Image (cartoon, rainbow, N blue to C red):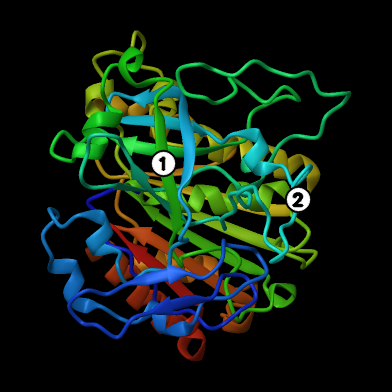
Amino acid sequence: MQTPRLLWCHRLHRSPHAPSILVSQSQRVPFIAWLRPLSPHQSVPGAIRRQMDYASTRKASVPHLVRTAAEPRQNRLYTVRLSHIDEVNPTVRLIQLTIPPYVQSLEGQEERADGESDQPQPLTFLPGQWVDVHIPGLADAGGYSITSTPADAQVLPSPGPPVESPMDEETGLPPMDPRGRAPYVELAVQHAPSNPASAWLWRPKDEIQGQELSIRIGGSFVWPPSGINLGETKKVLFIAGGVGINPLISMLSHLNNNDDETSLHHQHSDIHFFYSTKIPRSAVPSLPEKSPQAYLDRILFLSRLREIIRCQSESGRLRISLRLFLTNLHDDFAPLLSEPQQDLTIYARRQQPDDLRQVLQGPDGVIRPEETVCYICAPPKMTDEVASTLQGLLGDGKERVLFEKWW
């Protein structure tokens, strides 16, 4: 997700999974600062996710920092390097921001007399959070959901003694972690010429690759869900609309990693992923062959979703179903519907309330809210409609519907 964007989470109870914050009482200049860097063992007050119906009508020109002023964010800026750019399709780029390995390593940190370390705390985040991206020369920071996992931001264990790597004279950052893959965060940036930060990130690769940027972690739409016992959760529903898939792919990828503290603990957990999107029209003329797979490969994160499903089908740990709702199918795309796909179901329509009801019901036709949690990230209208439907279906369990809007 990226600016212009609105962050609105339906609910958040105090939990051990997010940091403490300080909120000023000023109505004109709201200010939020995290008192300490994010840790998976800290909490965010429920007041942060208050309802803001008026916000969905605000103009897209409102800067990201103003729009998200009521959201929690860390008070530390981290220096990163734009190390890799991959164009998924003509309208979306995947940006990889490398974190200096010494920042992510606690080795060699010495505490001062006041108990603080002389070195910066490692960059940490929860799946679903976003970053403020500060670009030299631009007055306003951009805002983008993190699409990678917390594990990707960690230094890989060394199979042998580390070999010292020379510093990059231009950026002052090591070209890579000498012990292996450099720690990084990944962003999906949509082409948006009217957005200064996105326009900069869509400059020619040779102009921006290797450049130094600053990022700050923020947001309260996260996995794991606060106040919900994962040991009793048997069904998770992710609903993405367009680039609303960005925070959700981070969550699902994290679950695929099987983190001990934040994974689903029930032996028979089902995950249902609904993805409503379009095949990029600008991609069609550039395809040498009109094969179904070629079309599908241009859809943001669809290949990653399918790889996760294949991985879990082999391990048997999680049962994941993927429903792809394509809203712009025409005759050129007919093979997509005629050629069966083993790992997903494709629909040439918008998702309907009955689609949601079917996956929430158990084999006996009963919906069990206490065993269910739902995440939605989509444009405002779609989010409102889906959230209303799910809240109606879950009844007393409607607090288990969490959502974030963008536009």
State the separation of the CA atoms marked 2 and 1. 25 Å
Residue at 49% x, 59% y is 238
Residue at 29% x, 39% y is 278
Looking at numbered disc 2 in the image, what kind of residue is underneath it?
Answer: Glu
Q: Is residue 284 above or below residue 261?
A: above
Residue at 35% x, 57% y is 351
Mark 2 / mark 1, whichever is N-terminal: 2
Residue at 55% x, 40% y is 305
Name the spot of residue 375 as percent of width and height, x first: 47, 65
Of 225 and 361, which appears nearest the observer? 225
Q: Quadrant of residue 300?
A: top left
Assign a secondary structure to mark 1.
strand
Q: Are marks 2 and 1 in contact (CB under 8 Å)?
A: no
Q: Residues within 10 Å of mark 1 (few under 14, many from 20)?
A: some
Of 264 and 93, which appears nearest the observer? 93
Name the spot of residue 336 as percent of width and height, x first: 40, 31
Residue at the limit of the structure toward the top, as seen here = 288
Residue 407 visible in this rendered orientation of the protein: no
Q: Which mark is residue 109?
A: none
Q: Which residue is mark 1?
A: 214
Classify residue 217 as left or right of residue 352.
right
Classify residue 201 as left or right of residue 21.
left
Q: Is residue 352 above or below residue 322?
A: below
Q: Which residue is mark 2?
A: 110
Looking at numbered disc 1 in the image, what kind of residue is underneath it?
Answer: Ser
